[in-house]
Image (tube, grey):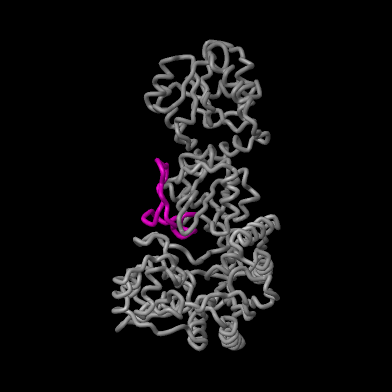
């Protein structure tokens, strides 16, 4: 049989023998045992009975079973609409609910109002008990039952408060994103397999598939916990996305109506989401913004601390070096990340957008007008998300940026305009016709853009190549950024590697270590006289050729692991929050994976 998430019990001649309003009743031990067993297996029980509530409570309390029920509906009204309302109150779909009653008219009435509802006569009890007995997972602490009791208390209070938003504001809802997903893989997998109403992608990954996903350094994933003044809800959600496209996005139905799904979608930057099937709550940029989560109540206003360390947040903005470091950090929901991503807005799907973290574009995200940005975004290797302003608008305790793209990418200025776009290897200008075959034949880096001679011709008529970033220009951009972010924010600049990568085969990367020396020197001089600027020197970690992966900008996993330790030390020294590192198991897994790749490709 299909195992329900909720069982709604009739009482007279169903849960007990006899009719309570006509005299004494006799308990049916198998029913009592079934309710208790269900509670231990995470299946909740409720009552829908035509009776006097106080009398029923007294009888069930005497038998020691009353506290096993939630959301009881005990009165003399017809059952159909009451059951429909009860199901809505517990935030479940009727298809996940079983109603047991000895009267076929009650069963038919309930089905009329809730067509997907499972219904049965009391003779199903033995079969139900046997089926529940076979469930392997135990909930001996009655966590699920207790969470529904919290939900029941909330529903009761909600009915006495004016607007829904007023109720949510006074609920003091706190939500956190956690990134140590491997440590909670069992609960996450259970959510993936069980959640329907707020499962937006409906992808039922096996445990093995989920583990591989969580170990993929290109995938950003997190699980969500929540609490409010009524109690704690534990792990109630999970997301995973790659290339700015959501793979998993799901939440427990017990949080329905709290706005958590929209809040998380806002927090992770509205990645592309393809909704499969029906869901009970829409999310998106067009939805009203969630203002009641992680908000201090007015009752605690005198306890607020204006110091930036009170609500300490960190922005990590840069290419693969910062992404790799971040993969070894687990935290308490304090990070915003802006890494290189692939766009899904163009005909050439999967175009890598890395110019967004070039300091020239970071500057122009604030200086260009919206119409000027819109013109740039029309280019086939650009998109509408490449000018984020979080670095200026967000209240961050620390901001980490990297100069790697500045040293590498070529820059193009719009003819007669102010826009400057950073793209591709500087050695092969897009506007030089002698390079066009290289781009159309993908002999040089294209960021996965499908270039044609028509595209290159059109671009050359609008933009002119102005070379590569110079150390002096970089310093000017850094000064601008420092002056326009919050004065209290610590700006951490990640330097380039000054050690030669001897196996380099790319013409554009020849002498890159010497170029890094030149750029690093200028940045070090800038930092000497700047307030709240810290340098992160990768050269303290790169000591031999064995530390490199496949380029001067890519290192072995153990190097990123060590760098992550330093990042954590820096963050913890600036905040009252303790950030932690992932387990060494992840390092071992990723290092082995990297080594296998090297062997298969014949590298090293």
Q: Quadrant of residue 65?
A: top right
Q: Percent from the top left, x then y, of residue 195?
A: 51, 40
Residue 576 at least partly seen = no
> How many numbered marks, from 0 up?
0
Q: Is residue 272 in view?
A: yes
Residue that extends furthest to the front in the rendered view of this protein: 602
Residue nearest the observer in this picture, 361 or 427: 427
600 lies above or below 395: above
Residue 124 sits in which quadrant? top right
Q: Position of residue 254 (x, y in %)?
A: 52, 41
Percent position (x, y) of residue 419?
Answer: 36, 79
In the image, what residue occupies the spot 56% across and 81% down?
Answer: 512
Please state the extent of the stretch shown in magenta in the rendering.
Answer: 264-290
Quadrant of res 55: top right
- The verdict on residue 135 being magenta is no
Residue under the point 65% across and 64% down: 557
Residue 46 in the image: above or below residue 428: above
Residue at position x 43%, y 79% from top? 428
Q: Nearer the viewer, residue 284 or 232?
A: 284
Residue 140 position in % (x across, y down)? 68, 34
Indicate whether 356 appears above or below 70: below
Magenta: main secondary structure equals loop
Please, is residue 91 above or below residue 58 in the view?
below
Q: Is residue 280 magenta?
A: yes
Quarter in which the C terminus is drawn: bottom right
Q: Residue at x 52, y 75 (%)?
A: 506
């Amino acid at each position: 049989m299909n195992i329900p998430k909720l069982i709604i019990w009739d009482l007279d001649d169903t849960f007990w023998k006899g009719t309570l309003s006509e005299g004494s009743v006799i308990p049916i031990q198998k029913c009592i045992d079934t309710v208790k067993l269900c509670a231990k297996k995470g299946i909740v029980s409720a009552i829908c009975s035509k009776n006097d509530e106080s009398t029923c409570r007294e009888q069930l309390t005497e038998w020691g079973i009353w506290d096993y029920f939630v959301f009881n509906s005990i009165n003399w009204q017809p059952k159909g609409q009451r059951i429909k309302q009860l199901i809505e109150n517990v935030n479940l779909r009727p298809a996940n609910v079983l109603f047991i009653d000895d009267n076929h008219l009650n069963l038919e009435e309930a089905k009329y109002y809730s067509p997907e509802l499972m219904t049965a006569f009391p003779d199903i009890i033995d079969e139900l008990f046997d089926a529940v007995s076979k469930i392997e997972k135990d909930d001996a602490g009655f966590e699920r039952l207790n969470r529904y009791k919290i939900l029941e208390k909330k529903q009761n209070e909600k009915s006495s408060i004016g607007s829904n938003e007023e109720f949510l504001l006074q609920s003091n809802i706190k939500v956190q994103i956690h990134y140590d997903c491997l440590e909670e893989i069992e609960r996450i997998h259970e959510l993936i397999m069980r959640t329907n109403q707020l499962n937006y992608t409906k992808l039922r990954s096996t445990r093995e598939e989920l583990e591989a996903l969580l170990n993929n350094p290109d995938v950003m994933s997190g699980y969500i916990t929540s609490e409010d003044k009524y109690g704690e809800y534990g792990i109630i959600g999970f997301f995973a996305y790659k290339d700015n496209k959501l793979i998993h996005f799901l939440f427990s139905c017990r949080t329905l109506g709290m706005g958590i799904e929209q809040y998380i979608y806002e927090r992770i930057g509205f990645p592309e989401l393809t909704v499969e099937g029906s869901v009970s709550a829409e999310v998106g940029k067009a939805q009203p913004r969630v203002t009641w989560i992680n908000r201090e109540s007015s009752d605690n206003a005198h306890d607020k601390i204006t110091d930036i360390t009170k609500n300490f947040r960190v922005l990590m903005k840069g290419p693969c070096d910062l992404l790799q470091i971040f993969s070894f950090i687990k935290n308490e929901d304090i990070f915003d990340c802006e890494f290189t991503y692939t766009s899904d807005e163009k005909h050439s799907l999967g175009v890598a957008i890395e110019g967004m973290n070039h300091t020239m574009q970071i500057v122009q995200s604030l200086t260009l007008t919206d119409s000027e940005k819109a013109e740039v975004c029309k280019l086939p290797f650009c998109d509408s998300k490449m000018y984020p302003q979080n670095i200026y608008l967000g209240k961050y305790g620390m901001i980490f940026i990297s100069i790697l793209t500045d040293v590498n990418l070529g820059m193009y200025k719009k003819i007669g305009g102010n826009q400057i776009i950073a793209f591709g290897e500087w050695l092969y200008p897009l506007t030089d016709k002698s390079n066009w075959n290289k781009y159309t034949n993908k002999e040089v880096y294209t960021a996965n853009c499908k270039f044609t001679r028509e595209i290159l011709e059109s671009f050359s008529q609008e933009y002119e190549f102005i070379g590569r970033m110079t150390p002096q220009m970089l310093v000017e951009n850094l000064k601008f950024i420092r002056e326009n972010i919050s004065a209290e924010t610590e700006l951490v600049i990640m330097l380039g590697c000054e050690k030669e990568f001897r196996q380099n085969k790319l013409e554009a990367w020849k002498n890159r270590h010497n170029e890094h020396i030149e750029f690093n020197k200028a940045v070090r001089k800038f930092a000497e006289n700047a307030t709240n600027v810290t340098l992160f020197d990768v050269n303290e970690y790169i000591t031999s050729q064995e530390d490199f992966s496949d380029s001067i900008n890519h290192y072995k996993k153990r190097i990123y692991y060590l760098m992550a330790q330093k990042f954590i030390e820096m963050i913890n020294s600036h905040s009252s929050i303790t950030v932690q590192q992932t387990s060494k198991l992840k390092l071992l897994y990723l290092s082995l994976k990297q080594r296998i790749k090297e062997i298969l490709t014949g590298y090293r």
